Amino acid sequence: MGDVIQVQTGGKLYIAGEYAVLTPKQSAIIKNIPIYMTASIKPANQISIWSDMFDYRAGMAADVNYTLIQETIAVWAAFLGKDVADLRPFTLDITGKMERSGIKFGIGSSGSVTVLTLKALAAFYHVKLSRDTLFKLASYTLIKRGDNGSMGDLACIAYDDLILFTAFDRRRVRTWIESYDLKAILAKDWGYGIEIIKPALSCDFLVGWTKEAAISRDMINLVKSAVTDDFLMQTQKAVLRLKLALEAGVKCDVKAEIENVSGLLAALSPAIYSDKLKELKAASQGLDAAAKSSGSGGGDCGIALSFKEKDSQTLIERWQTNGIELLYQEKL
């Protein structure tokens, strides 16, 4: 029936700018996490989709578990100017749960599935997609679904790199969806920014998993009303200073700005720093390191930058003592 094509997408975590980036023109620094999902796609007699999240296969008939993948396929068909029924049929299998024992890591699984499905379809239909078009198609899919996120996760996953993401006006894009076809929307200037950051300092980037799941959508709905103009202004300044400090390799400024954005989040809402995330952060005290929550908070993961190998080991041990698992580690 033809060769199997495989593609992958990773996850993401916020280093700075979460919550602020829900507002247009605000920026965030987001790090790609190379914990991958894999899609395998091959020709078939009819469209068939399967994910290792579920114990059954589906087609294109409405299915609550497969809605995200089905809607992404429908967007792809619109991108090609076709009806779903007219697509060359395929079997699409997705593996690589971003979770353990049913508890998600919180590194962007829905975003990763959307980008992954689009990458697989592009490869199958021999369509070359730029990273920007991939990002726009994934964002269009989630906005159409009513997703309330910033779409920064999609930018990071599509680019698979450490980025500075500047948010676009999602409400405006939502109104476009009601008035224009997909091709016309993709051709418009959405007003976002995606810039790859190349750090000039040597440190360990560590991800600690609390093993407590948080639902980003619910956290956003809980916290977003607390966001003030002052929070936005202070966070934007800190994010841009952190970007400059990373690129210039100024360790003291990197640590200071991570502490700064962490404090702004803690003051924004007590819901962000769960007890486990407080322990994750406190573990960096007295070390040549800085730690904070990541993303919507309330659980999931936190991150740390550590500037001495010995301190990285101490931090990891302190996390383990508090039931926090080292999910990922790399040298920046």
Image: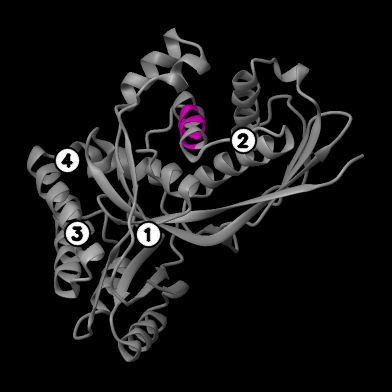
In contact (CB < 8 Å): disc 2 and disc 4: no
Mark 4 and mark 3 lie on one chain; the one further toward the N terminus is 4
Farthest residue toward the left? 230
In contact (CB < 8 Å): disc 4 and disc 1: no
Residue 244's disc number = 3
Residue located at (17% from left, 40% from top): 227
Mark 2 and mark 4 lie on one chain; the one further toward the N terminus is 2
**Which is in the foreground here, disc 4 or disc 1?**
4
- 167 vs 3, left or right, is left
Could you give the CA–CA distance between mark 2 and mark 4, rounded to whole angstroms? 40 Å
Residue type indicated by callout 1: Gly
Q: Which residue lies under the disc numbered 1?
A: 299
Q: Quadrant of the N terminus?
A: top right
Residue 52 lies in the magenta stretch: no
| Residue stretch rendered in magenta on the structure | 135-140
Mark 1 and mark 3 lie on one chain; the one further toward the N terminus is 3
Q: In the structure shown, which secondary structural element does the residue marked by tag 3 occupy?
A: helix
Residue 127 rendering spot, x and y as whole percentages: 65, 32
- Crowding near pointer 1: few (<14 within 10 Å), some, many (20+)? many
Mark 3 and mark 2 lie on one chain; the one further toward the N terminus is 2
Could you give the CA–CA distance between mark 4 and mark 1, rounded to whole angstroms? 20 Å
Residue type indicated by callout 3: Leu
- 33 vs 271, left or right, is right
- Crowding near pointer 4: few (<14 within 10 Å), some, many (20+)? some
Residue 33 rendering spot, x and y as whole percentages: 47, 61
Q: Which residue lies under the disc numbered 4?
A: 227
- Crowding near pointer 3: few (<14 within 10 Å), some, many (20+)? some
Q: In the structure shown, which secondary structural element does the residue marked by tag 2 occupy?
A: loop
Q: In the structure shown, which secondary structural element does the residue marked by tag 1 occupy?
A: loop
Residue 206's disc number = none
**Which is in the foreground here, disc 2 or disc 4?**
2
Mark 1 and mark 2 lie on one chain; the one further toward the N terminus is 2
